[in-house]
Amino acid sequence: MELKMSNITLSKSGSLMAAANSHAVRARINKPIAVIDNNWQALVKELPTRREESAVEQLWVDNLSINSYSDKAESIAIKEMNRSIYFSEIGLRATLFVYRDGVADLIVVADKTVYDKASLLLIIRKIIGSENSSAVVAALSLSAEHFKLHQALSPSEVDDIAVKAVALEGEPDVRNLTVIIGHVLAAYEVSKDAPVAWMKNDNDNAGTLDCQTQYLALSIALDADSTIASLVERLNVDKEADMSQCKVGIIHDQQTYHMPGVSKWQYLPCLGPSHELTFIISEGLNQATSLLVMFNRKTYCPDLIKRMLNSVRGIAAEISKGTNQKLDNQRLLAESEQASVSLLGRNDIEVEPPCRVEERISELAQSQPDNIAVCFEDYQLTYRELEEKANQVAHTLLEKGVAKGEHIGICLSRSAETVITMLAILKTGCVYVPLDPNYPLDRISYTCTDGDLKFIISELAEIPEIATDRVLFHGAFFAESSKKPTHKPEIAGLSVSDAAYIIYTSGSTGKPKGVVIPHCNLTHLINATKNEFGLHNQDVWSLFHSTAFDFSVWEIWGCLLTGGKLVVVSYWTSRNVEEFATLVREKKITVLSQTPSAFIGLIREDEFNPVGNSIRLVIFGGEALDTRALIPWFDRHPETQCRLVNMYGITETTVHVTAQNISRHHAVTASRSVGKPLPGWYIYILDEKQRMLPPGVSGEIYVGGAGVAMFYHGRPDLTSERFIPDPFHKGTMYRSGDKGMMLENGEMLHMGRLDDQIKLRGFRIELGEIRNTMLAAEGITAAAVTFTQKDPHDPATARLDTYVMLKGISIDDVITHAKRYLPIHMQSSSYREVSDMPLTPNGKLDTKRIEEFVIERDNKNAQSNQKIAEPTSEESPVEACSGKQNLEDLLVAIWTATLGKPVKAEDNFFDLGGNSLYAIRISAAAKEAGLPQIHMRELYIYQTITNLAGLLREQYSIC
């Protein structure tokens, strides 16, 4: 079926109310001009006017040297029909287009507040001579009074209006079509909860009400068995609808009136949208049905409306075969459109072919041997030294019996030795597996077993029992390696498709899962971004993140594979924003990778401790970015000097997938775009049946192309579930579990998760993993974990809370268990005992009611039910603390103002919901109040105000 499109722009000259209050008829006739003109003049004299004295309205006649059946004739007629009445003494305008082949189009445009549809049709009959004027005047005495445009239908103030139309197959019933429109509106998230105005315009007889407005609840909630027929039965008028929320109108117009002397005619119920989005369903004499849409260009783009019409048309065609078909089985995107939509989600710019990581480093050691490669505190390595030391470590590992493809753990704090070890492992043909030494011992033990680690190079004094025979203590190990040859070891059979590293991510079953990434993915990532970001050997990068977090993969290898200088940031410096800002300034960092949570702290620090002007590129990743928080940064660092890029990515697709340059405009408009895919990566938005969705409809994000991981180590079932064949291109695609939407320009919006996975300060966390870990403790009979964020624009207010039902143990035992098995970023702000787990009607945890079931204990670790204090003024922490005489009182005031809740001197920082972002703010507030700086390390160690006050008195002799 061919799509018939008209795209008409209506000028804003005059009142736009005129457009919504105007309607028009076009009649194809074959009568002399003189007859038409005489009938018009006679009619005008008899019609009521708007003033006592009236000028005679003229019939506009245009003789055209084109045939009536030409496209140009159609265009001219349609344009005239859509030219509304701005002011007329009699509320009418008549135009006659006479074509070369003797056929004419009579077009009459009328003011609907004066003439209804039936009256307008009688006027046409009078003009062509098939109706006497007295009948028309009698009809108009009723028409002008009974038709008034409903207040709720007043048009939006828009610059222009666009119109698109489509012919429909199969004579769809108007009720079926209304349900289909409701389904499509919900899919495109245009009108999920707001009512829809439904106007029936089906009476062509004078003297009767022809347009009645009702409000329908078209929020179509589909279940697996929903059919058109079942949904039509549920299509009821919403008598309590809030008309002010109504943004969509549906007009049903029947054009079944027979007009003598007219070969065909066309009626437009309104020339402007009654709402921001107005659908007009027209049924003609030949039972053909067409659908016309008028829309506000400021709210909707023409391409989106075209997609919506295509979706309606396609579903209507399928439903015409029978209304008992399940609506959920119908495609929103026709198969014929899949190819063009899939192109939106890919980037085919050619990049350098991938290579092995260690081969590229060896090349750089030859081409720029004296350039600094790695810097940590006062220690630095050139590329030649990095290559030689990595070769020595590789020889040591080979002598200990490692073989190509085996897995070697690295449990080291961030340092130059960590980078050397990673490179050395790759040189042996083995796979490196980073472990964070700050993680609980049991979690490290699990990774050692699950990861099939041949050796673990570790700095920990305490070693998991299962790994005692595999641990290489880093001090002795590096001393031994320093005596080995510095030449590159020769390993046969190495390939770019070999695994390079395994990073463990949170798993819903309660156990982390290892993601296996090959060399080709990693080097393709760097090659795909090198030119776009202008990465070069004069860049200075920071290694800010834990090596167990995949953002560090980008930081380390993005720098070293492009010949840059890598500044390794110690753990405590990364947790102290003042020290980090100083490091950025002194080391002249040019490429900075940050989670949005961390960067917000740096923005605040930059106000009074400037980071300098060396940063030219900031890469955001790890969690959702609220672009509005970047406005203060733009105030001090113009876009021309420092480029900000938001990148969406997943561990399973090699760190990054998309890139979006962020301008001040993006920040001001709170853009959620994460940009377009990197060269070689593919993005698809699919529905629950893995069918491609059109732009403008949200669904699950699937990623294909160059970055897709090999598999989950030792988890074939989970691998087959998440890594599936790509039906649109060759290869494999990854099912992300993220919700997204493709835009017509190829950019993607990231819209959160479809499951209970969350991102907290850059860490990907499965709430199910925390719950299952808690349930593994003897004495915990039920557990639930919630994630909340009081202020959606402040990541510091994001928190986890755990609720448990207990038998024979206490909350203290629960906390001990959590600290033993969960890393700190997965530990909750509070642990609460409950008497029951309340459920919603559909069997899910009722998070709104769970507080009602909390059992209050006289226990310092059980969070109280005290309501969080809301700020009552705009005073700063310094003002809030002024006048305090006692050090403890001053600190209590700072903590209370920062955390937003009552605090006592003996309260534990973490039990109060404290986190790294709050620690930064407490440190800054203390400094403003004239106290010595409280470093995050001190806050993490001493944890209570009483302990901190003792420390400050001892170190600084404060009274």
Image (cartoon, grey):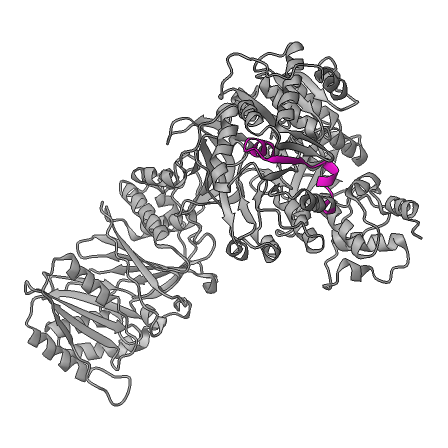
Q: Which image quadrant: the N terminus? A: top left
In the image, which residues are magenta? 555-578
In the picture shown, does residue 518 fall above or below 175?
A: above
Residue 204 in view (yes/no): no
Residue 451 falls inside the magenta stretch: no
Residue 405 percent location from the top left of the image: 57, 15
In the picture shown, does residue 604 fall above or below 93?
A: above
Residue 68 percent location from the top left of the image: 11, 61
Q: Is residue 26 left or right of residue 545?
A: left
Q: Name the residue: 15% across, 61% down.
A: 73
User: 573 and 29: which one is in front?
Assistant: 573
Which residue is the extreme one toward the bottom? Answer: 53
Q: Is residue 65 left or right of residue 359?
A: left
Residue 571 falls inside the magenta stretch: yes
Q: Is residue 762 left or right of residue 175?
A: right
Residue 778 percent location from the top left of the image: 75, 26
User: 457 and 300: which one is in front?
Assistant: 457
Residue 740 percent location from the top left of the image: 48, 42
Q: Name the residue: 11% across, 72% down.
A: 128
Q: Quadrant of residue 575?
A: top right
Q: How many circles with numbers are drawn on the protein?
A: 0
Residue 495 in view (yes/no): yes
Q: Is residue 662 left or right of residue 254?
A: right
User: 435 and 765: which one is in front?
Assistant: 435
